[in-house]
Amino acid sequence: MKTIGLLGGMSWESTIPYYRIINETIKNCLGGLHSAKIVMHSVDFHDIEILQRTGRWEECGRILAQAASSLEQAGAELLVICTNTMHKVAPAIEQAVSIPLLHIVDPTAAAVKKAKISTVGLLGTRFTMEEDFYIDRLRQKHGLTILVPEQYDRLEIHRVIFDELCVGTIVESSRSEYHRIIDRLIAQGAQGIILGCTEISMLVKPAKIPVPVFDTTSLHAEYAALRALNEEMV
């Protein structure tokens, strides 16, 4: 079994399910008392969020690249960024290490295609929904058609993530808003919905959505566990 390096804390609320799902997957595969071999570097999200908000992405990249290098030195044999948004600086991280970085988009896209779906709605931070680093990988590498909410809805999704979910707060009116936005995407032709922020699964429950829902947190964490066991998911 390979050792997984986790870049966490962005936010810590979403890092917890990564640890749980990875260990559950290892236990399901190997049985008994088996658990995952993990090293983790958890950042102070307060500092990272300021850099995000002020557009200082190069500085974000340097911080996470240094953290990734420390994980490699600690014995990590593959890397996982426990957040969608910070994949914006994935190239800087990849340049800093010699071990593979498992990109969150790839197992997500594989699950979408396995469901025989080609058009999906995307929810996430405004960075994920509006910038190229995430959507272009879904489109160009995986051939998917991506629908995003209109601007007002994108701002509301983003607000709920940072003001509520990242601090562990669940507000029922926000759940209703997310469902309204999802319904609108489905009306526009979305055959499935990607929860493209690792905190959104705290709020949106797939059983309440009439189309397939792809939880990037679960898919990414399971993928990491299988790769640690040298089993391919994609």
Image: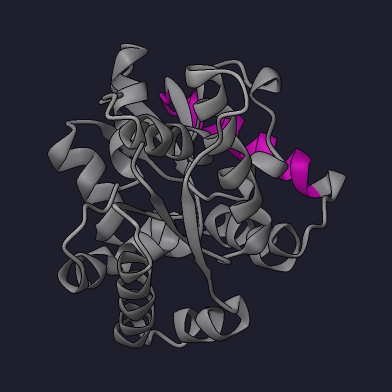
> Is residue 214 or residue 154 the one in the foreground?
214
Q: Is residue 104 above or below residue 35?
A: below
Residue shown at 36% from the left, 36% from the top: 1
Specify the farthest residue to the front. Answer: 33
Percent from the top left, x then y, of residue 15? 59, 54
Residue 122, image quadrant:
top left
Percent from the top left, x then y, of residue 178? 67, 42
Q: Does residue 120 show up?
A: yes
Q: Is residue 229 above or below residue 139?
A: above
In the figure, is residue 157 to the left or right of 111?
right
Percent from the top left, x then y, of residue 104? 36, 45
In the figure, is residue 65 to the left or right of 171?
left
Q: Is residue 75 above or below residue 27?
A: below
Percent from the top left, x then y, of residue 13? 68, 57
Residue shown at 39% from the left, 39% from the top: 224
- Residue 52 part of the magenta-drawn span: no
Residue 62, image quadrant:
bottom left
> Is residue 2 or residue 52 the one in the foreground?
2
Residue shown at 59% from the left, 76% from the top: 45
Count of marks placed on residues:
0
Q: Does residue 212 show up?
A: no
Classified by dominant secondary structure, the portion drawn in magenta counts as: helix
Specify the farthest residue to the right. Answer: 172
Residue shown at 77% from the left, 39% from the top: 176
| Residue range corresponding to the magenta coloring | 174-190
